[in-house]
Image (tube, helix red, strand yellow):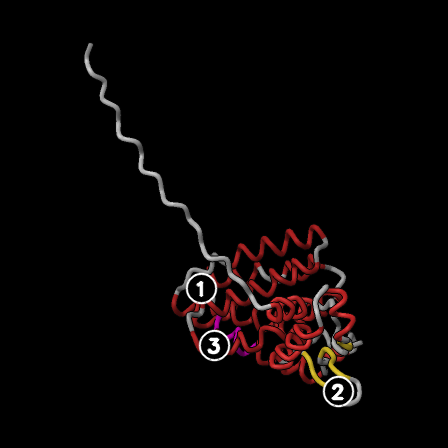
Amino acid sequence: MPETTLAPAPAIAPPDFRPIEQMPLRTIVADMLRRNIITGKLRPGTVLVETALAEQMNVSRAPIREAIQILEKDGLVETVAYKGKRVKPLTAREVAETYSLREAFEIFAVRRIIESGTDASALWTHCRAMDDAAEKGDREALTAADEAFHRTLIRLSDHDLLLTLWNGLYLRIHQIMALRNVAQPNLHDIAANHPPIVRALEARDMPEGVGLIAQHTRRLANFDPASIAELNV
């Protein structure tokens, strides 16, 4: 009887045991608080009581105190004499200045994208996400997609210093967007503002692209900064 030759067993990949990232508790708490601030769930002016937060998060007061110190460095929390810590209120001037600087950044980004012929198709992902969020009435998801659209616009400009400056504004921009979206009842209108910008970029139409992004940011600024500041607690 002929001898049967067995094929060699296939090589088995070694187990993939990646290190589990252990984050300090203060970092986890700071991330939770930061997310609630920039999404507008913790309104500007809200007093942050350590004992109440510790009870809600089921942690001791120490990581709460350390997390609040991190947020003070972020510029999201401030200390008020005899009152303690609170989410830093927004002023009408701060809202107006944030949006005027954002407009300058985004016009610069649009110019670079069109001049370099950069593929802007990545922006459609965020447009679709905004449409989906608007359809579901999900303001938080729409704000996240809105911010992602504009961050991607900045990233596509391929300018490291611009991206660094944008990141410095990111927390306030996201917070203002969230508060604005609370006051703007029609989410479909917010979502609809973005596709024309992408089409202008893809058409390499400089006057149209610059005009649309300027109009977009000015429309938000004309939303009345004082009305957003009035959302302070």
Question: For numbered disc 2, what is the local secondary structure?
Answer: strand
Q: Nearer the viewer, mark 1 or mark 2?
A: 2
How many C-alpha atoms fall within 10 Å of the one at disc 3: few (<14), some, or many (≥20)? some
* Amino acid type, mark 2: Val
Give x and y (percent) for residue 121.
Answer: 47, 56
Q: Which residue is at a point 43% across and 67% down the rendered structure image?
A: 114
Question: For numbered disc 3, what is the local secondary structure?
Answer: helix
Q: Which quadrant holds the C terminus?
A: bottom right
Q: Which quadrant holds the N terminus?
A: top left
Which residue bears the numbered disc 1? 204
Q: Which residue is at a point 46% across and 72% down the rendered structure image?
A: 111
Instruction: Give, as a single range, the part of the protein colored magenta.
Output: 103-109
Counting residues from the start of the chain, the first of labels 3 and 1 encountered is 3
* Amino acid type, mark 1: Arg
The numbered dot on residue 36 is none
Give x and y (percent) for residue 117.
Answer: 39, 64
Q: Which residue is at a point 51% across and 68% down the rendered structure image?
A: 209
Picture quadrant where residue 230 is located: bottom right
The numbered dot on residue 162 is 3
As drawn, is 155 to the left or to the right of 181? left
- Tally of numbered tags: 3
Which residue is nearer to you in this view: 62 or 97? Answer: 62
Q: Nearer the viewer, mark 2 or mark 3?
A: 2
Per the model, the C-alpha gap separating discs 2 and 3 is: 33 Å
Counting residues from the start of the chain, the first of labels 1 and 2 encountered is 2
| Residue 106 forms part of the magenta stretch | yes
Q: Which residue is at a point 69% across and 71% down the rendered structure image?
A: 37
* Amino acid type, mark 3: Leu
How many C-alpha atoms fall within 10 Å of the one at disc 2: few (<14), some, or many (≥20)? few
Which residue is nearer to you in this view: 64 or 161? Answer: 64
Which residue bears the numbered disc 2? 80
